[in-house]
Image: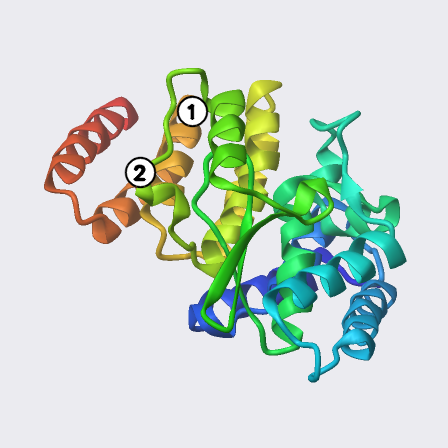
Amino acid sequence: MTSRAEAREILRHVGQQPDDEIDLAEAALALGVLESPGTPLDGYRRHIAAIVGDLADRVDPDTDSLEARIAWLHEVIVERHGYSGDHDTYDDLQNANLLRVIDRRRGLPVALGILFMHAARSQGWSMMGLNFPGHFLVRLDADGGRAILDPFNEGQVRTAVDLRDLLKATAGSAAELEPGHYQPVSNRDVLLRLQNNIKLRHLSSHDVPRALEVLEAMRLFAPEEPSLWRETGLLEAHGGNLNTAIAALETFMSLTDSDRHRHQTAALIQQLKNRLN
């Protein structure tokens, strides 16, 4: 049985690692334990290892190519293990918990993307998440070529036309593709995106204590991300926890590069201190 304390220790270790050494799948499993405490992780680790093994069994150096790698990933993750996006109950919190995603073989784009990236990287392939808004996508590079894959839709290759349509569907008809949408994101950013789904759903249901729990976990694996400390401070202040809010906002001030944000936050901290007095 994996306790919340053990999961937090895994995430705290992730927070100390260089980004390129982060094991996305292991970190995501630990995050899942925080939502489902006491869940043994060995079976989930074996399942992820089975995905890796099944992919390794299919890889043929004689026919290796970008197209072949895309096909092998589809055969293993989608056909062999039955993963797909949850189109019917998209907003279900289980879709952002890798434990439940593995149980149900259904999930959000970013949760499924973690499985795609873990499998691809296990073979030494270059795969990364992209900064595409509203719908997580991954990019696979091989032999000078690259393809953008949609983990939510069975790892399908997405063209520029597909991406434009997808962007307009998620961001509005006036939205247009920008170079930044194709930029790779760090491993920490992938984990932050995974947890943001849970945090935002708690906030939309006005469950601030649960949102703060999610933010606490995010700060474990991304302790130097200023926005997490700022949001924590604002939510704690809203709940009347003024000392905790001040401490979080002071940490934000020490991390942010923005003079404007520092000045604004200093004024807010003074207001909170005045309320304490």
Can you give x and y, in whole percent of width and height, for residue 254 in the image?
A: 22, 52
SS category of the residue bearing label 1: loop
Which of the two residues, 164 or 224, is positioned nearer the viewer here? 164
Which of the two residues, 223 or 106, is positioned nearer the viewer here? 106
Residue 134 shown left or right of residue 72 in the figure = left
Tell me which amino acid carries mark 2.
Answer: Ile
**Residue ID at (16%, 30%):** 264
The CA distance from mark 2 to mark 1 is 11 Å
The outermost residue toward the front is 63
**Residue ID at (29%, 49%):** 251
Which of the two residues, 134 or 216, is positioned nearer the viewer here? 134
Can you give x and y, in whole percent of width and height, for residue 204 in the image?
A: 57, 20
Residue 93 shown left or right of residue 165 in the figure = right
**Residue ID at (37%, 33%):** 177
Q: Which residue is mark 1?
A: 240
Q: Is residue 125 above or below residue 184?
A: below
Mark number, residue 38? none
Can you give x and y, in whole percent of width and height, for residue 136 in the image?
A: 55, 42
Tell me which amino acid carries mark 1.
Answer: Gly
Residue 137 shown left or right of residue 151 in the figure = left
Mark positioned earlier in the residue sequence (2 or 1): 1
- Write down the quadrant of residue 195 in the picture: top right
Quadrant of the snapshot with the C terminus: top left
At label 1, counting other C-alpha atoms closer than 10 Å, the crowd grade (few under 14, some 14-19, many 20 or more) is few
Image marks 2 and 1: residues in contact by CB distance under 8 Å: no
Q: Which residue is mark 2?
A: 246
The outermost residue toward the bottom is 62
SS category of the residue bearing label 2: helix
